[in-house]
Amino acid sequence: MKKEFVCISCPVGCRLTVWDDEGEVKVSGNTCRRGQIYGVQEFTAPMRTVTSSVPVEHGRQAMCSVKTAQPVPKERVQDVLRAIRALHVKAPVAVGDVLLEDAAGTGAQVVATRRVEDRRKYS
């Protein structure tokens, strides 16, 4: 079975064709080594970094952007998003703060990607 992907490893966006050749995954269409690695990964076990936002109690901003610190299996993205939707954090929040240690049992941490100060500090 052959699959086609657009590589997202660099700005070129190569059109990859990936297939299993007697137990060895082959990739064509890539112009760099990163495309080869991406094609094999996407064909065998696709992973995604999940981004979202969470409400911040007492924050100068109502929401804080977050992401998984490492990619999670593509089929677990919805589970991770449900876990993120259940989060409610209190200000202050710093970039890199771990807001969830093990998102939906994937082993991935959910970290803040935005600083949110406590609005009460400025009242």
Image (cartoon, rainbow, N blue to C red):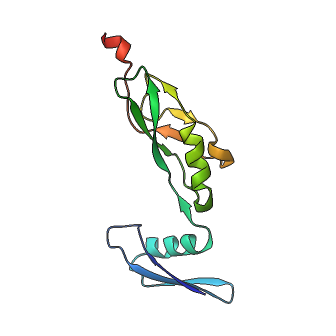
Say if residue 26 shows up in the picture. yes
Percent position (x, y) of residue 119? 35, 17
Q: Is residue 14 toward the left or the right of residue 26 in the image?
A: left
Q: Which residue shows up at 61% across the image and 87% down it?
A: 1
Extreme residue in the bottom direction: 22
Classify residue 62 by image quadrant.
top left
In the shown orientation, is residue 108 left or right of residue 63?
A: right
Vertically, is 100 above or below 69? above
Q: Residue at x 55, y 41 (%)?
A: 84
Please report the residue visible at 35 percent of the width from the left and 12 percent of the height from the top.
121
Of 11 and 67, the residue lying toward us: 67
Marks counted in the figure total 0
Please state which of residues 14 and 105 is positioned toward the viewer in this rendering.
105
**Quarter of the figure that contains the C terminus:** top left
Where's residue 16, x and y in %? Answer: 45, 81
x%, y% of residue 95?
42, 34
